[in-house]
């Protein structure tokens, strides 16, 4: 069953061009190699866009119990879908930034991958006390994962993704500071998760994926009929 799509229009929102800002963040990304190849980004979304995204009524209920898997709460997950971007200019601008051929090409060059023929998928996440994710590597249909953290809580810096080795040992933790990001190419060694820890507020993030044409949940895609160039 597709997640809820009752997204209301936000008044006064105009079309925004965020692609150049995202590409600037990519160009200044810092590469890391432990425990797997990844990149950290800063100032991912422009100041003209992220306040509008935070203000939109597009958020699913804050999720506490997950049993370590996001799919536990499939009915309340929410995506920047074709429906959402058509009705909400801010969601449309977000999708356009990552669908842009220049952005896709830059990610491909940076990561050494070819994303042509894949599809854009953006999930909006709200997590609260009790949330955790078991160690996992992302399924094979995901060609790229970019996590963008959007919590403004003073403790948010400790709410980033845990980076693990194959034995599940914590090797590092991404910063969850506001408007930072973690990017990696899913593979057999890209173990990550979120160990239980205090969340005094709401952990807000975006999960940006490029997925292969075999992806079955087409309602999750921003442009289900249009693969990236």
Image: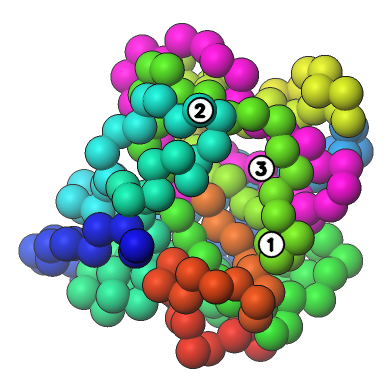
Front position in the image: 24 or 158: 158
Is 202 one of the magenta-colored residues? yes
Q: Which of marks 2 and 1 is in front?
A: 2
Q: How crowded is mark 2: few (under 14 residues within 10 Å), some or many (20 or more)?
A: some
Is 190 one of the magenta-colored residues? yes
Q: Which residue is drawn at 84% across and 52% down?
A: 187
Instruction: Say which residue label 2 marks.
Output: 67
Residue 103: which quarter of the image?
Answer: bottom right
Q: Which of marks 2 and 3 is nearer the N terminus?
A: 2
Residue at the farthest front position:
1
Front position in the image: 2 or 196: 2
Q: Which residue is drawn at 37% across and 25% down?
A: 64
Instruction: Say which residue label 1 marks.
Output: 142
Q: Is residue 115 above or below residue 200?
A: below
Q: Which of marks 1 and 3 is nearer the N terminus?
A: 1
- The range drawn in magenta is 180-206
Q: Can residue 154 be seen in this view?
A: no
Q: Which of marks 2 and 3 is in front?
A: 2
Q: Is mark 1 on a helix, strand or loop?
A: strand
Q: How crowded is mark 3: few (under 14 residues within 10 Å), some or many (20 or more)?
A: many
The x and y percentages for residue 196 are 55, 15
Instruction: Say which residue label 3 marks.
Output: 182
């Amino acid at each position: 069953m597709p997640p809820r799509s009752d997204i209301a229009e936000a008044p006064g929102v105009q079309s925004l061009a965020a692609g150049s800002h995202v590409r600037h963040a990519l160009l200044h990304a810092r590469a890391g190699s432990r425990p797997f190849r990844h990149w950290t980004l800063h100032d991912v979304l422009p100041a003209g866009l992220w306040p509008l995204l935070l203000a939109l009524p597009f958020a699913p209920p804050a999720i506490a119990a997950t049993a370590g898997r996001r799919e536990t709460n499939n009915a309340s997950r929410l995506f920047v879908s074709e429906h959402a971007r058509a009705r909400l200019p801010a969601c449309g601008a977000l999708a356009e930034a990552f669908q842009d051929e220049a952005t896709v090409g830059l990610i491909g060059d940076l990561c050494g991958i070819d994303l042509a023929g894949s599809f854009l998928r953006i999930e909006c996440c709200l997590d609260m006390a009790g949330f955790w994710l078991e160690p996992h590597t992302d399924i094979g249909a995901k060609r790229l994962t970019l996590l963008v953290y959007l919590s403004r809580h003073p403790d948010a810096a400790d709410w980033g993704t845990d980076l693990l080795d194959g034995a599940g040992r914590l090797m590092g933790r991404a910063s969850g500071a506001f408007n930072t990001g973690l990017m990696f190419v899913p593979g057999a060694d890209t173990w990550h998760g979120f160990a239980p820890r205090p969340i005094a507020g709401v952990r807000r993030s975006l999960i940006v994926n490029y997925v292969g044409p075999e992806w079955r949940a087409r309602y999750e895609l921003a442009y289900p009929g249009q693969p990236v160039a």
